[in-house]
């Protein structure tokens, strides 16, 4: 319900950015690969950061909104919207350690908070490699032609230069496929 209310406020241009920035603590840390992560939950070695809220839009005219909660491009001469750090970019489906029996396709769902910003794109890593057919703004997609075994998934958001602005945790899931028994050999 909170997500729906947030989307309505953004769509109407009536969001209180200062209240949004202060709504939750934000933590920042670097992983072993040097990738910077942001989260609303602290992890060992994370530092709490203060999020500087952008100035609210002028009350006289709300900014136009494009599909999926993106702010439409500003006209020349107008201030560009400030970049606000993402608070989460996580895989929400499948569940961590979920096992699928006799399937070769799995639906994947993501949670990206705040809304995907203009010029940014979503990248999903399957077994450590980017999913080539993942639509750049999609928060759900189906992985097909999966092989049996254990697999990993992780989500991240890339900025317009291809740099990682948010990286979520990696989760594991498992695919079990039926085993075809070899033909019986008859001995005479």
Image (cartoon, grey):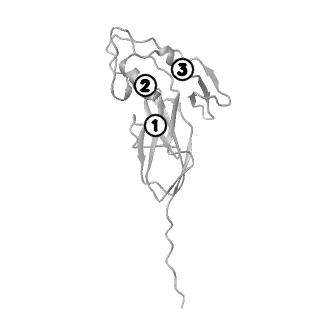
**Relative to 145, is 136 above or below?**
above
**Relative to 153, is 161 above or below?**
above
The residue indicated by pointer 3 is 23
Q: Position of residue 131 (x, y in %)?
A: 44, 43
The residue at the point 39 percent across, 43 percent down is: 133
The residue indicated by pointer 1 is 123
Residue 5: image tag: 2
Q: Residues within 10 Å of mark 1 (few under 14, many from 20)?
A: many
Judge by depth and name the residue closer to the eye, 38 or 132: 38
Q: Position of residue 63 (x, y in %)?
A: 34, 16
**Relative to 56, is 162 above or below?**
below
Quarter of the rendering containing residue 56? top left
Mark sitting earlier along the chain (1/2)? 2
Which circle, 1 or 2, is nearer the viewer? Answer: 2
**Relative to 140, is 8 above or below?**
above
Question: The N terminus is located in which quarter?
Answer: top left
């Amino acid at each position: 319900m909170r997500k729906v209310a947030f989307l309505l406020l953004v769509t109407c241009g009536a969001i209180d950015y200062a209240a949004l920035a202060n709504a939750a603590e934000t933590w920042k840390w670097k992983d072993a690969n040097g990738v910077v992560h942001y989260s609303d939950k602290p992890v060992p070695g994370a530092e709490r950061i203060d999020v500087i809220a952008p100035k609210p839009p002028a009350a006289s005219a709300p900014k136009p909104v494009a599909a999926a909660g993106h702010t439409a491009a500003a006209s020349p001469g107008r201030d560009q919207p400030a970049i606000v750090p993402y608070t989460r970019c996580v895989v929400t489906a499948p569940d961590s350690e979920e096992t699928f029996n006799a399937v070769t396709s799995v639906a994947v769902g993501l949670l990206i908070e705040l809304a995907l910003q203009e010029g940014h794109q979503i990248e999903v890593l399957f077994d450590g490699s980017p999913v080539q057919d993942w639509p750049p703004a999609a928060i759900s997609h189906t992985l097909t032609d999966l092989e049996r075994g254990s697999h990993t998934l992780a989500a991240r958001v890339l900025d317009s230069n291809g740099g990682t602005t948010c990286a979520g945790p990696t989760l594991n899931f498992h695919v079990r496929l039926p085993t075809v028994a070899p033909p019986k050999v008859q001995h005479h």
